[in-house]
Image (spheres, rainbow, N blue to C red):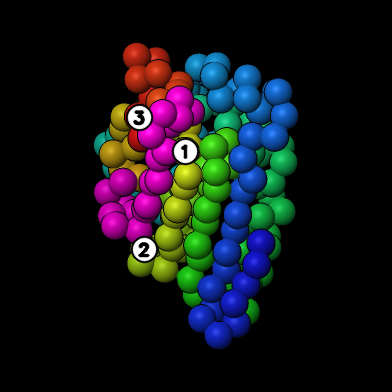
């Protein structure tokens, strides 16, 4: 986590795959499970599709066990100090974590577009179709997904398992 006082911006960056376990988890099609904690912001919790929002259970477990409480506390503290913009970024598995963290910030009303920007590099898929549609609708043009030609990770887990960018 880094901040820029001049622009009132918080930057949250997630590292990519670093271990064999990380690489293996990129390749495995984990089950899609309901998003936890449940999204609470208007436009998320009150949609007809809210009960259908699912994300990669492996990404959720990794993310929640490692960073969710600390990052939420950190970003919330900076926002209460007057910081107003958030940039979230990550590469590979870190891109999946960045995507999930952005979902939690926006879906729970902590930050709203245009004050949040997500930039991912060669990220694996994280959401099912219903959640990807809602996520892309809310972020509009504030989400940049960069993919290197020939990299297999952005194509995983496969669409046939219900995953979508």
Separation (CA) of disc 1 from disc 3: 14 Å
Separation (CA) of disc 1 from disc 2: 23 Å
Compared to 51, does 7 lie above or below? below
The residue segment tinted magenta is 136-154
Q: Residue at x 57, y 68 (%)?
A: 10
Rendered location of residue 40, percent (x, y): 45, 49
Task: Point out the residue furthest to the front here.
Answer: 150
Question: Given this view, does label 3 or label 2 mark the residue nearer the observer?
Answer: 3
Q: Mark 3 or mark 2, which has the lower sequence index? A: 2
Rendered location of residue 119, percent (x, y): 45, 53
Helix, strand or loop under label 1: loop
Q: Is 63 left, or right, of 19 in this rendering? A: left
Q: In which quadrant will I find the N terminus? A: bottom right
Q: Residue at x 60, y 82 (%)?
A: 5
Separation (CA) of disc 3 from disc 2: 21 Å
For the residue pair 95 and 69, the one nearer the viewer reads as 95
Q: Is 113 left, or right, of 71 in this rendering? A: left
Residue under label 2: 113
Residue under label 1: 122
Helix, strand or loop under label 3: strand
Q: Is 86 left, or right, of 128 in this rendering? A: right
Q: Is residue 53 visible?
A: no
Compared to 160, does 72 lie above or below? below
The quadrant where residue 61 appears: top right
């Amino acid at each position: 986590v880094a901040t820029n006082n001049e622009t009132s911006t918080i930057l949250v960056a997630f590292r990519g795959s670093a271990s064999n376990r990380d690489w293996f988890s990129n390749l495995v099609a984990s089950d899609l499970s309901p998003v936890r904690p449940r999204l609470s912001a208007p436009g998320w919790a009150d949609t007809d599709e809210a009960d259908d929002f699912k994300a990669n259970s492996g990404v959720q477990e990794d993310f929640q066990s490692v960073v969710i409480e600390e990052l939420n506390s950190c970003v919330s503290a900076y926002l209460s100090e007057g910081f107003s913009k958030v940039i979230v970024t990550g590469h590979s598995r870190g891109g999946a974590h960045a995507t999930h963290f952005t979902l939690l910030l926006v879906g729970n009303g902590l930050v709203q577009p245009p004050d949040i920007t997500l930039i991912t590099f060669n990220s694996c898929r994280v959401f099912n179709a219903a959640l990807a549609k809602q996520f892309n609708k809310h972020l509009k043009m504030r989400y940049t997904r960069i993919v290197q030609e020939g990299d297999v990770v952005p194509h995983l887990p496969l669409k046939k398992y219900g995953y979508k960018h």
